[in-house]
């Protein structure tokens, strides 16, 4: 692979509570999944992050979530299709308005946390998210977990998709993310992470938590902005990619 997208979850600070280093990450990544206020992010902070993304030429995505600020969007919610469609429409509308004010546009949608994990395999909620996206802007791309059924469901529904792998997360032998409740689910050694991502970009494979090799077809790599050492991880991935001749480029083109 000559080029691959590098994305991060940003805009997640809320009032006096600070999450991650958006400015540093925006100098490294090619795409930014920006919180829309349901799991994190306040209007002024989201606006600043969108403005900074635009200034850095970083492509913007709507990081939609269940309405769960207390749980940071990581608690599963048995929402109805009607509720979920409306929640997605509301969040995309908010970030689209902020992007327009900042002189840029929203190009894709990446669900967050529990919603991301749920729709990867839950066709009912997945279809509701797809329907919400299409109701606002059918040209938006859906970012989802590589190898998960949600990608085919979205394609059949007429949405373009991009498959995503996670730099700082461990995988099961089935190609699913290891639950954050389990030991070893989050990776921290930036050099080992960079090695894994070079392998992914070159061969489309990763080592699962049991040592087996799994196939992961992905066009984008995520470094969680709230992970400890997130900036160092992203910097090391970028350094290694540049050394290996692998370009970091958004799947959506230039911002």
Image (tube, grey):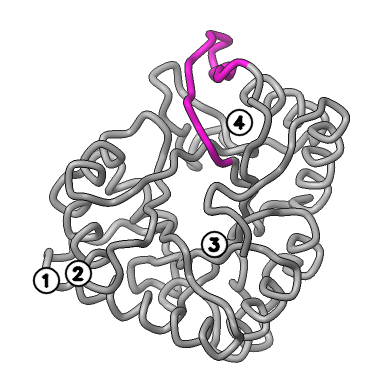
* Tag 4 residue: 184
Mark 3 in CB contact with mark 2 (< 8 angstroms): no
Pick the quarter of the image with the C terminus. bottom right
Q: Which mark is in front, 4 or 3? A: 3
Asked whether 209 falls inside the magenta stretch, the response is yes
Quick one: label 3, few (<14), some, or many (20+) residues within 10 Å? many
Pick the front one: 179 or 82: 82
Element marked by disc 1: helix
Instruction: Tell me which numbered mark, 4 or 3, is placed earlier along the sequence.
Output: 3
In the structure shown, which secondary structural element does the residue marked by tag 4 occupy?
Answer: loop
Sequence order check, earlier mark of 3 and 1 = 3
Q: Which mark is residue 85?
A: 2
Q: Disc 2 to disc 4, how far (Cα)?
A: 34 Å
Q: Can residue 77 be found in the magenta stretch?
A: no
Label placed on residue 82:
1
**The N terminus: image quadrant:** top right
* The one of 120 and 18 positioned closer to us in this rendering: 120
Return the residue found at the far top. Answer: 212
Q: Which mark is residue 33?
A: 3
Which percent across, then down, holds residue 194? Answer: 76, 31
Q: Quadrant of residue 176?
A: top left
The secondary structure type at the circle numbered 3 is: strand
Do the residues under discs 1 and 2 have CB atoms within 8 angstroms? yes
**From which residue to which does the magenta span run?**
203-220
Q: Nearer the viewer, mark 3 or mark 1?
A: 3
Of residues 40 and 153, the one drawn nearer to the viewer in this rendering: 153
Q: Residue 113 appears at what percent x and percent y?
A: 43, 55
- Check if mark 3's residue and mark 1's residue have beta carbons within 8 Å: no
The mark nearer the N terminus, 1 or 4, is 1
* Vertical relation: 198 (above or below) 253: above
- Horizontal arrangement in the rendering, residue 253 relative to residue 176 (left or right): right
């Amino acid at each position: 692979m000559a080029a691959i997208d590098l994305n991060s979850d940003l805009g997640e600070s809320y009032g006096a509570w600070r999450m991650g280093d958006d400015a540093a990450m925006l100098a490294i990544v090619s795409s930014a999944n920006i919180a829309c206020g349901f799991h994190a992010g306040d209007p002024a902070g989201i606006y600043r992050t969108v403005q900074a993304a635009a200034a850095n030429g970083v492509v913007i995505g709507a990081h939609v979530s269940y309405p769960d600020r207390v749980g940071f969007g990581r608690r599963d919610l048995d929402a109805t299709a009607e509720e979920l469609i409306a929640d997605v429409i509301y969040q995309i509308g908010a970030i689209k308005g902020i992007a327009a004010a900042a002189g840029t546009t929203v190009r894709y949608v990446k669900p967050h946390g529990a919603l991301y994990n749920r729709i990867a395999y839950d066709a009912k909620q997945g279809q509701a998210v797809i329907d919400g996206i299409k109701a606002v802007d059918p040209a938006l791309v859906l970012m989802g977990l590589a190898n998960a059924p949600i990608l085919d469901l979205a394609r059949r529904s007429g949405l373009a998709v991009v498959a995503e792998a996670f730099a700082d997360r461990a995988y099961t032998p089935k190609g699913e993310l290891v639950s954050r409740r389990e030991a070893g689910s989050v990776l921290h050694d930036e050099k080992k992470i960079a090695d894994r991502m070079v392998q992914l970009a070159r061969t489309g494979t990763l080592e699962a938590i049991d040592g087996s090799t799994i196939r992961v077809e992905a066009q984008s790599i995520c470094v969680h902005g709230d992970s400890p050492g997130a900036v160092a991880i992203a910097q090391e991935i970028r350094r290694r990619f540049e050394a290996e001749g692998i370009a970091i480029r958004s799947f959506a083109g230039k911002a």
